[in-house]
Amino acid sequence: MQITKATTDHLPQLAVLFDLYRQHYEQQTDIEGAEQYLAERLVQNESVIYVAEEEGEMIGFTQLYPVFSSIGMKKAWILNDLYVSEDHRRKGVASGLLDASQELGKATDARYLMLQTHIDNAKARALYESKGWKLDEEFYYYYLSI
């Protein structure tokens, strides 16, 4: 398995995986829209995407968005998306993508990386905790839908 930073050359395969990821969250399939969305993020340097490939097949990805810590006066990253194709789960792909994300944080002198997951996603939570991620027990997060 190889993990690399995505480029626009990865878009056709990446869009398929991204579409599957969105369907997992009960969104309608839209591969064309997925490719356009990802192309915009990459071309405009609005996110960093890592892809996992095995024998020429893309088997997983993660997408991180930059934010900033006013208190720490540093960049931070939100690990917004992490997906591994069903037939490649439990093989270390997600772990490798998390490692690449952590290296991005170190390379950019980030204050922190942050992610969110469903409360009932026990497998993912166990993985995150095994990699040193800590559950925030200090702050509540609020959302306002627009």
Image (cartoon, rainbow, N blue to C red):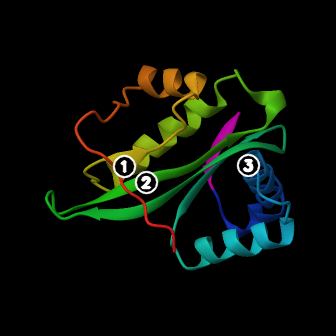
Q: Amino acid at mark 3?
A: Tyr
Distance Cα–Cα, label 2 vs label 3? 17 Å
Label placed on residue 78: 2
Q: Is residue 57 left or right of residue 119?
A: right
- Which stretch did the figure color magenta? 1-5
Circle 2 packing at 10 Å, graded few (<14), some (14-19), many (20+), is: some
Above or below: residue 126 compared with residue 71: above
Q: Amino acid at mark 2?
A: Ile
Specify the quadrant of the image occupied by residue 49: bottom right
Closer to viewer: mark 3 or mark 1: 3
Number of numbered labels in the structure image: 3
Above or below: residue 134 compared with residue 5: above
x, y (%) of residue 67? 35, 64
Q: Determine the secondary structure under disc 1.
A: helix
Q: Amino acid at mark 1?
A: Gly
Q: Is residue 94 magenta?
A: no
The answer to the question of whether label 2 and label 3 lie on touching residues, with beta carbons closer than 8 A, is no
Circle 1 packing at 10 Å, graded few (<14), some (14-19), many (20+), is: some
x, y (%) of residue 21? 73, 49
Label placed on residue 105: 1
Distance Cα–Cα, label 3 vs label 1? 23 Å
The answer to the question of whether label 1 and label 2 lie on touching residues, with beta carbons closer than 8 A, is no
Distance Cα–Cα, label 1 vs label 2? 10 Å
Q: Quadrant of the N terminus?
A: top right
x, y (%) of residue 87? 84, 29
Q: Determine the secondary structure under disc 3.
A: helix
Circle 3 packing at 10 Å, graded few (<14), some (14-19), many (20+), is: many
